Each structure stands twice: as structure tokens, then as C-alpha cells.
Image (tube, rainbow, N blue to C red):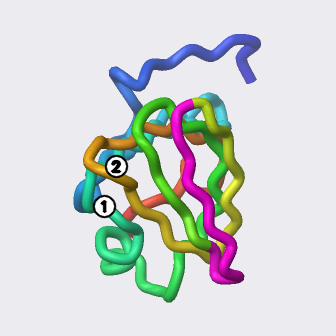
Amino acid sequence: MASIVKKSFDNPDEVRTPDKAKVSVCDLDGVAAAKLEIQPGWSWESCVKPMVGGESCQARHVGTVISGQMAAKHNDGTEQVFGPGDVYVIEPGHNGWCVGNEPCIAFEFNSTAAKTYAKAD
């Protein structure tokens, strides 16, 4: 492993574009970093579930919101809204959605979401 790895989301290793979203992924020698951009009207249930199936998102999310807001509701009923400056861990078994009329931009690191979110097999 290199002692320093630098990449840019302006030139990511992979870009995924599920409905109403864009996921830019940089591979930092085995550590995945993702920039998630979700648009108003986006939800996991309506935009990602048709691609991957299942009853809820099974990815583990670890990240921070830069702008806009998003929400998550876990299968256990726990619900939270995240905004700029918030950091989060969202465990598998949830639905998520963009809150309000502004896009939400979040960064995720070394999570299952950064590696596999909205990735077609």
C-alpha cells in the first residue's frame, strides 16, 4: 500500500447513476470513498429497490452530509434527519429519502454503501 493516496471526485474510478442520484466512487487502495448526490423526490424505496430488490436497504452507511438534508428510517422504527455537518452511521435494514426541495450531498467512507450502493451485478 502506498504511504499517500490522492484522488478526486472530479475524476472518480466509478460513477453510478440510479434514478435521481449520482454516486461517484474513488478506490483509495482498498478503502472506498463515495460522493452521494441525491435529488428531491429520491428515496431508496422508489429509486434503488427496483434495481436491487428486498424490503429495505442492506448497506451500512458511514458518512457526513455537506449540503441539503436526507432522512433514514430503520426497520426498528428509529428515524433521523441529517443535515450539513452531521455525521452518521446507518445500519442495514432501513429506507432513506431526500428531504425538502434541495439536493443532498453526502460523503461516505469505507462503508458497504461506498463499495456497492446502487451497483448492478
Q: Which mark is residue 2?
A: none
**Residues at circles 2 and 1 in contact by the CB criterion of under 8 Å:** yes
Q: Is residue 50 left or right of residue 59?
A: left
Q: CA distance from mark 2 to mark 1?
A: 6 Å
Q: Nearer the viewer, residue 48 or 106?
A: 106
* Residue 110 visible in the picture: no
Judging by the rendered image, the residue that carries numbered circle 1 is 42
The segment highlighted magenta reads: 74-84
Looking at this view, name the residue that lies furthest to the bottom: 55
Which quarter of the picture shows residue 121? Answer: bottom left
Type of residue at label 1? Trp
Which quarter of the picture shows residue 86? Answer: top right
What residue is drawn where x is 42% and y is 84%?
A: 53
Local SS, label 1: loop
Q: Residues within 10 Å of mark 2 (few under 14, many from 20)?
A: many
Judging by the rendered image, the residue that carries numbered circle 2 is 38
Residue 47, image x, y percentages? 30, 69
Q: Is residue 99 left or right of residue 80?
A: left
Type of residue at label 2? Ile
Looking at this view, name the residue that lies furthest to the front: 100
Local SS, label 2: strand
Q: How many marks?
A: 2
Q: Is residue 76 left or right of residue 15?
A: right
Which quarter of the picture shows residue 110? Answer: top right
What residue is drawn where x is 40% and y is 39%?
A: 68
